[in-house]
Every structure is written in C-alpha cells, then in structure tokens.
Amino acid sequence: MKLPLIIQGGMGVGVSDWRLARAVSLEGELGVVSGTGLNSMLVRRLQLADPGGHMRRALANFFDQSIAKKILDTFFVEEDEIENRHFKRTALPAIKLPVSVQRIYVVAGFVEVWLAKEGHSGSVGINFLEKLQTSNLPTLYGAMLAGVDVVLMGAGLPKEIPGVLDKFARHEDASISVNVIGCSDASKYKTTFSPLAISAHVKTQPMFRPKFFPIVASSTLAHHLMHKSTGTVEGFIVEGMQAGGHNAPPRGPMKLSERGEPVYGERDAANIKEIRELGLPFWLAGSFGSAERLVEALELGANGIQVGTAFAFCDESGLAKHLRDEVIQHWITNSGIDGEPVFTDLQASPTGFPFKVVKLPGTLSEKEIYDQRPRKCDLGYLRQMVVLEDESIAYRCPAEPVEDFVKKGGKSEETLDRKCLCNALMANIGLAQTQEDGYHELPLLTAGDDLINLGQFLQPGRQTYAAAEVLATLKAKAEGES
C-alpha cells in the first residue's frame, strides 16, 4: 500500500460513511469510514427501505448468505410499508453479546468497508474509538472480511489492537481488556470475539492484516504504543486539541478561558521531533486543513495530514444535507453572525473528555432545546461498566435518567449537562429515532476549529463543494514537498 499524503478523518457516526471514503480513495488518498455505530446504521437504513439498494448489494456479497438473509428478514422494510421513524433496535453493547447480535456487528463492518472499496483499487481505512471496547471486535473483524487496508484508533490506549489484528488475520479468537470502574485488576474483565462462532465457513475467507495507525496526542503515548503493544504499529496520527469530536484534556490543573473552554498550553502540544525520531510514518491532524499547513507538516517530517472538518461538510459527507447547508450558510456565507462557531464543552460528552460542539440554531447545542429532551439511554455505546457491591456488573451513562445513574453508584453531579451523543449523532446523519413517547431525537454537530475556514473550498457563486475539491485545494502547494 502506498502511503497517503492526505488521510480523510474518521468522523462521528456515519459522517465518514462509505460514500465519502470511496470518493477520497478514488482520488488516490486514504478514505476512512467511521466504525462507530455501524450496527445501528445498517438496521436503520434497512428499515428505511435501503434507498439505492446499497445495503442489499453489499449483503449479497457477504460470504454466508444465511446470516445476510436473517438480517434482511428481521430488519428490511419495503418503502410503502414505512409507517414512522420509530426504528427497531439491536441489543445494547455489552461485555458478552449473543452470537446473533455479534453477527450484526460483523456484517455491518463488512458492508461499510465493502461499499467503500467497491469498484476500485484504492486504499480504505476504518476508524474506531478505543473507549467503545464492547463493540469494536466484531465490527473490526467484519471490516477485515471486506479487506480494509488500515485501522485507525483513538480516544484511549489501544495497545492490544495490533495483536488482535494478527489473530483475526488467521481467523483466531481474540480478546481485549475492558475498563470497569471499581475494579483494580485491569486484566480481570475481557471481551472476546470468536470468528468460528459466527460461521463454520469463515476460515474459507481470504484475510490479510491491515496496517495499524493509532491516534495520539503526545510523543509519550506514541512511544508507549510502539514499544508496548501486542503487535506492530505501522504509523501514527498526531492529533492536536483543535480537532473536532473528543479532545484529550489539558495536562495539569484544569483552567478555563473567559468562554468557559479548557485552556491548553505548550505541555499539551505533541513533541514532533520526538515522534519523528521513532522512525515510523506519521500524519498531523487538528487544524491542518489548508495547503499552507500541509506544506508545514511536510517540512516537519510528517508524511502528510489527516483532515476531518473540511470533509465533514462536503457533498459526499454522511451529514444530512440540510445540516451541511445550514452550517455553511450560518457560519461561512454569513461570516459567523453570532460569535465563534465551535465551543469546546467540558460537560457535553458522557465520557468526561472535552467535546467540540458546533453552535447552530435548532440543534441540541442550545441548552433550552436540550433541556426539553427526555433522558433516555437506548443505544448505549458510551455506557460505562461498574462493579456493584454484590460484585455484579452494571452499565451506566451520565446522560441516562439521573435516578438510574445514581442507583448504579453514580453521583448526581456527574450527570450535569451531559448529553446523549449516541442519539444526537444518529440524528446528524438523518437516522434520528422517534421514541415511544413521540419525542424525535435532534442533532448535535461537532467540528474542529477549522470550521471557520470552509470558505476556501467554495467556488464563487456556490454554496457546496466536493471531496475532490478539498483534495485539490489542499494539495495545491504540496506537489514539490511530498
């Protein structure tokens, strides 16, 4: 695989979907699908009659058609039979999942990567959050069945994943440790995925081990992953605090700006010299979405850059079109009519990590709108596992009903201003749930600080732009540098 100059970031739930990844890969760079929530995306697309037939086309290419047929029989709804947007759900992620549920994860990972790679020879990656430990393994295996070229992972210390890739390439069982609050032994709880439990025919499928590019915020973390992982690491994405989504918290005591955002200092910037000395390829991310910054990255010794925000609002993005249009109109063509577009919120994410929120009228970025949402946890990707007094395991989320969280040993103050990212991110891509009580889930957008610079990709008289235009703009000054 030829190393890319530009890696398209793996964003949100379905923002970096197969269409976007495919568009970038067709241009010779690394397109990346997001691995988060793929099981829910697959079953909801099917319940909307699978517009374009893309899910069914990919399912028809899954190696075990009995599994594909079962999923279709369970979830597919014909267009004239769609009555409302109350979607049938799959089981919430857990340390131990029934084989029937694991199969949905496997197939979902396969479908998204297969579609991204369909009809071309370009490279495709998949991005995971290390914190989603209970759902990553079967989805990862499904992506490998589809021939994914690169696995990227951030939001944690994914030192066990390289060994998992080695085992999955041989169709062997693999396990990873699961973080459980109240358990001092980090190795006590593990989640395991067994390929042969999915299908007796799985060993007939050709497999190869993809490259592994962990996402790091410091040279210390990069050094640790390079030398302490269970297998080889082939490169790094070095991400700064300007990137969208979740950010690493500042090092040292928390200080807030006048806007109420965490203040980052020199200690929070990765030491590029030390990362360069590790001798592995690396790409810089976090407000590197311009031609000038690409040249700067190359001069620092990087192989290139990872870019998310610019692709999040392009034509091929999985974001609902009306949301892309509203962001561009509100913040770009109207020149940011009411202040800064992105706020780094310390409270929004149930993970406790800072989370960048795009301020946009009518979305959950407005407190009065979010306060009207009935608290509910029905997707559960960000649930935390905790040991109770009787040694049993409970699953809790600071965004669930406060009384439920407290019953599981949590403190009510931990729930203050926490937002249900799982449902909001599904709403971002047009797959919002209508709950049993009639509440229709609303979006909550995230983007990096580069959002304000999207105008560089707009041609005169146009309000939209394509992924290919992003790449052409970024590479305009880099031909002689790479």
Image (spheres, grey):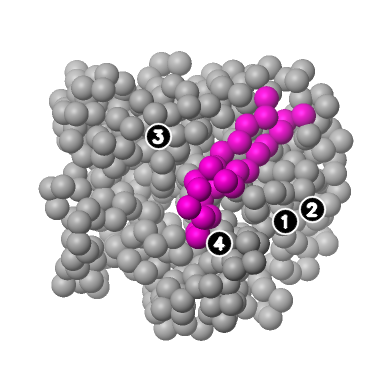
Q: Nearer the viewer, mark 2 or mark 3?
A: 3
* Residue 379 screen position, x and y as percent: 62, 61
Residue that sits furthest to the left in the current view = 266
Residue 71 counted in the magenta span: no
Work out whether mark 3 precedes mark 4 in sequence or the reverse, and give the earlier one: 3
Work out whether mark 1 precedes mark 2 in sequence or the reverse, and give the earlier one: 2
Mark 1, Cα crowd under 10 Å, few <14 / some 14-19 / many 20+, is: some
Q: Is residue 377 visible?
A: yes
Considering the numbered disc 1 on the image, is that residue within a helix, a strand or a loop? Answer: loop
What separation in Å lies between label 3 and label 4 (alpha carbons)? 27 Å
Query: In the image, what residue type sits under mark 2?
Result: Phe
Q: Quadrant of residue 301?
A: top left
What separation in Å lies between label 1 and label 2 (alpha carbons)? 10 Å
Which residue is at a point 37% across and 31% down the rendered structure image? 225
Q: Which residues are magenta?
A: 172-196
Which residue is at a point 50% across and 60% down the rendered structure image? 182
